[in-house]
Image: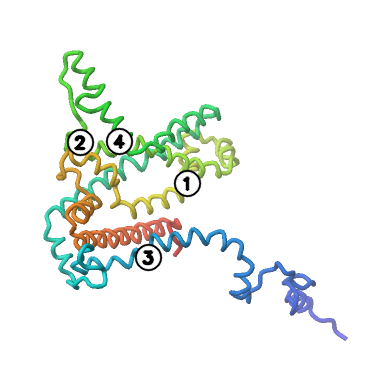
Amino acid sequence: MAEPARGALADRDSEPRHGTAAGSGTPPGPGTPTARTGWWHRLRRDRTLLLMVAPAVGLLLLFTYVPLLWTTVAYLDYDPFTQGLWTSPWVGLDNFTLLFEDSRFWDAFANTLSITFIQLVLFFPVPIALALLLNSVLSDKVRGLVQSILYLPHFFSWVLVITIFQQMLGGAGLLAQQLRAHGHEGFDLMTDPGVFKFLITAQLVWKDAGWGVIVFLAALSAVNQDLYEAAAVDGANRRRRMWHVTLPALRPVIALLLVLRVGDSLTVGFEQILLQRDAVGPGASEVFDTYVWWVGIANTDYGIAAAGGLIKGAFSLVLVLIANKVAHMLGEQGVYRK
């Protein structure tokens, strides 16, 4: 009798048997994942993790999603002192019409975009450059000391940060006093509307650059050191190793943080700007958040303020989607996958 072809035997042996794991002769164990794992089974399996995350989810729902019901104020003639949310008259898009007719809104919109662009160009690259610089330091003690000094201002409140800048760059500050003591004219950068956007960017760099350094240093710590050794063997100097090894390793983190930064671009620092608004005037310092605060809280025009907040949220969502699409085009994951 002729023997079966070897290829047929090989194909038959390679097929998984029913009731057994593929490629083995034993049935799958209790921990082996199956395609038919039910929702209730997964719920029971992960119940401990779900209980751990339940308080955070509850707080998120309570303070983030439940207040979304009050966005209907943008379509109402809302007065919390005489009429409630359910009894206020419906005005439709009248609040949006009044908002668009207000020149202060467009001034705040222009100031927000210009401050966002300046901070994106001058602030965002600083943590990357500092992380690359610290990563090149061989001494762990020096690196830890510098990192602690850079990170310390992150814990300061904006009141303290602005006070420090006032004592240094104000009209009665240290630098102005030293210039007058040597026969020169003093200056007051804290009340100069022309440099206000660059001033608040400098304050942001001094306060929060250390936080970004930690994020990028954590990404650099995951880089395989064999890549640096292989590049050095191939004759790559330090600049080449940074360009071909370090920066490609940081690119996913840079893309993710850039998308998040663009999405949060219309929030340029409410407390920081509100504390300095009177010193330079609303023409140079009014942004989306301060405009909504003054209209809604100070002038009690809650409907117009809510309309401004909705426009800000919708515009931020569009910016996130565009930035995430650009990240996908560059081959990065971004905030979410395709």
Give neighbour class at mark 3: few <14, some 14-19, many 20+ (Cα, 10 Å): few
Q: Identify the residue at image location x=48%, y=61%.
A: 57
Q: In the rendered view, tell whether residue 98 sits above or below residue 111.
A: below
Residue 113 pos. (x, y %): 23, 50
Nearest the viewer among 318 and 163 is: 163
Q: Where residue 269 sits: x, y (%)?
A: 30, 46
Residue identifier under label 3: 66
Q: Residue at x 47, y 29 (%)?
A: 146
- Would residue 34 appear left or right of 320 to someone viewing this image? right
Q: Is residue 154 left or right of residue 219?
A: left
Frontmost of labels 4 and 1 is: 4
- Which quadrant of the figure contains the N terminus? bottom right
Q: Amino acid at mark 4?
A: Ala
Q: Quadrant of residue 32?
A: bottom right
- Find residue 248 and name its label: 1
CA distance for labels 2 and 3 = 40 Å
The residue to which callout 4 is attached is: 202
Give the spatial CA distance, label 4 vs label 1.
Answer: 28 Å
Name above or below for residue 131 compared with residue 30. Answer: above
Which disc is residue 283 wearing? none
Mark 4 vs mark 3, foreground winner is 3
Q: Give the Cα separation between the discs numbered 1 and 3.
A: 41 Å
User: Under tag 4, what secondary structure?
Assistant: helix
Q: Are marks 4 and 3 in contact (CB under 8 Å)?
A: no
Of mark 4 and mark 1, the one earlier in the sequence is 4
Which colouring convention does the figure follow?
Answer: rainbow
Who is closer to the viewer here, 136 or 195?
195
Q: Amino acid at mark 1?
A: Pro
> Hey, which residue is sitting farthest right in the picture?
1
Label 4 neighbour load within 10 Å: few <14, some 14-19, many 20+: some
